[in-house]
Amino acid sequence: MGNRRRVAERGKTRPAVIGGLIAVVVGGAGFGAYALVGGGASADDGSRAASTDQKPEVKTGPLSATEVTTTAKAFLTAWQSGKATEAAAATDDSAAAKSLLTGYTKDARIKDVTLTPGRPTGDKVPFSVKATVSYKDTEKPLAYDSALTVVRRTSDGKPLVDWHSAVVHPDLKDGDKLVTGEAGTPPVKALDRDGGELTKKKYASLGPVLDGLREKYGKQAGGKAGIELRVVRGKSGTSDGKSDDLSDKTLLELSKGTPGTVKTTLDPSLQAAAEKQVAKKARSSVAVVRPSTGEILAAANASPGFNTAFQGSLAPGSTMKVITASLLLEKGLASADKKHPCPKYFTYGHWKFQNDDKFEIKNGTFKASFARSCNTAFISQAPKLKDDDLTKQAQQVFGLGLNNWAIGVPSFDGAVPVQSAAQMGASLIGQGGVRMNPLNMASVSATVKSGTFRQPYLVSPDVDGRKLATASRTMSAGTLSQLRELMSYTADYGTAAEAMAGVSGDAGAKTGSAEVDGQKKPNGWFTAYRGDLAAAGVVQQGGHGGETAGPIVAALLKAGG
């Protein structure tokens, strides 16, 4: 389906109209009282003409409190007055600002705007918005919080609002716009596998999923569109760890449409358990699939605004060693019970790789290296591999990185690009250019458990006749048997043992920690299977996967019976 804050409201005093002037008084907010006069952004210039023989002085350094409040006042005054050109002139991207602010009135049909600034924090000014959305004979109130940041223009030092679409509404990404009218697609009533209704109120994580279901199935499910204010996605950039295939989002319903019905594969008890687990760990995400069918049984995110479980794009760390181990076993470069090198260091492509705490295993087996997650045991085999070996293994056996999954909503299918030298070595341990999300890694464990890649799906392909992705080959029986032995041993005696304690039956697991530039702690990963369940999770900036993501995944394997 393609690769892929609000600020606390303060000082809600409404403007008072005094003799044709509008005054906003913000109690204790640091703004004092000021007049919102129609002069807009140009009214606060106050600069003097420079003499002909002197260059104008360019002001530098931190912004003063007066500069911040004055700039915010100019912008908010003009916006509130409907003067898009003047408001845009108070920003550092007047063209983009004018376009969106004009559309705020014209396309989004928002009127009677009241903007109330809160207490500035440094160069950031929060503000609340109260307005009315009006379409033909229907009106509804609109209220939300946003914030702006003031910066100094490099060329002349003038303070300006740092323009991003999120200033207008926090759900907007740059390139998006607001539109009010008949919904582009009818609403849908999404059901779990037992026929119960799935709602954002009941399952906080499912907001992006429900938006995706509506976008994909709204028209063919037989519903009728209503009137709504919505975010229409444009061409936006990406931030680290996120794909950019976001669905349009409804912000306000003026009149309800008639929904069509779409049934999903989600298990209500497992979804509830997943929501409960991610609520315990900030920035955590998890996905659960059924290995025998590929059905997605649960997916949850501690930050429900973005579906990291399906659309995240993150280095998976040592959980990638499941795929790498299958490659080494197939090529005869490793065998579960044979001796395998695990030195403190190994240099490849002019990079010196090491193990966690610089440990080594002398005279140990490959099984011991896998269970303890020895990096050098894998990278030491890089000189014997071709640059595209790992890419082919991921694509041909595990169905990853081909950009052809069709799960029913937007998802990212993983990426294992062909790399060389040190980057190829790093890819073997889930770093370099390798990118995955919990759904991808749950699918990896599911492939090991079932022996065959089955593309995960949220909506049955029978609903719309779409074709699911397939893998071109399977592992040999010998390779599969050894790989299961490695994961089982890791669950019983390796880095996954503490988290998997109490998970009975046929089970296997692998932990991972992925270093990310600029983070003090690595992202913690965990992937595992038990019976006909496979799950994977990540806790960003959490630390070791066995201690952070492990308990989340293990709890869901237990909850699945």
Image (cartoon, rainbow, N blue to C red):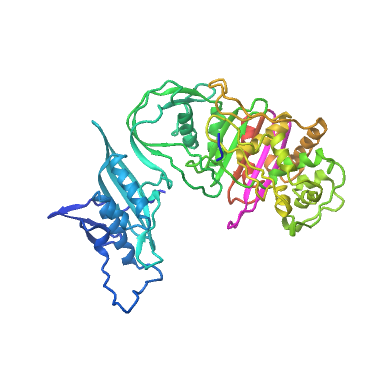
Q: Is residue 35 visible?
A: yes
* Up/down of 472 relative to 194, above or below: below
Magenta residues span 506-531
Task: Return the residue found at the far left.
Answer: 19
Q: Quadrant of residue 184?
A: top left
**Residue 16, image x, y percentages:** 18, 52
Give the left or right position of residue 205, taking residue 478 as reference. Answer: left
Which residue occupies 56% across, 42% down? 312
Magenta span includes 525: yes
Q: Residue furthest bottom?
A: 53
Name the residue: 23% across, 61% down: 33
Q: Which is the main secondary structure of the residues drawn in magenta? A: strand
Residue 202 counted in the magenta span: no
Q: Check the image and name the residue furthest to the front.
A: 52
* 501 in relation to 196, above or below: below
On screen, residue 66 above or below 415: below
The picture places residue 163, in percent across and down from the top left corner, at: 38, 54
Is residue 269 placed above or below 377 in the rendered structure? above
Relative to residue 363, is residue 536 drawn left or right? left
Residue 72 x/y as whole percent: 31, 58
Q: Nearer the viewer, residue 26 or 492?
A: 26
Q: Residue 219 in the image: state x and y as whole percent.
A: 43, 24
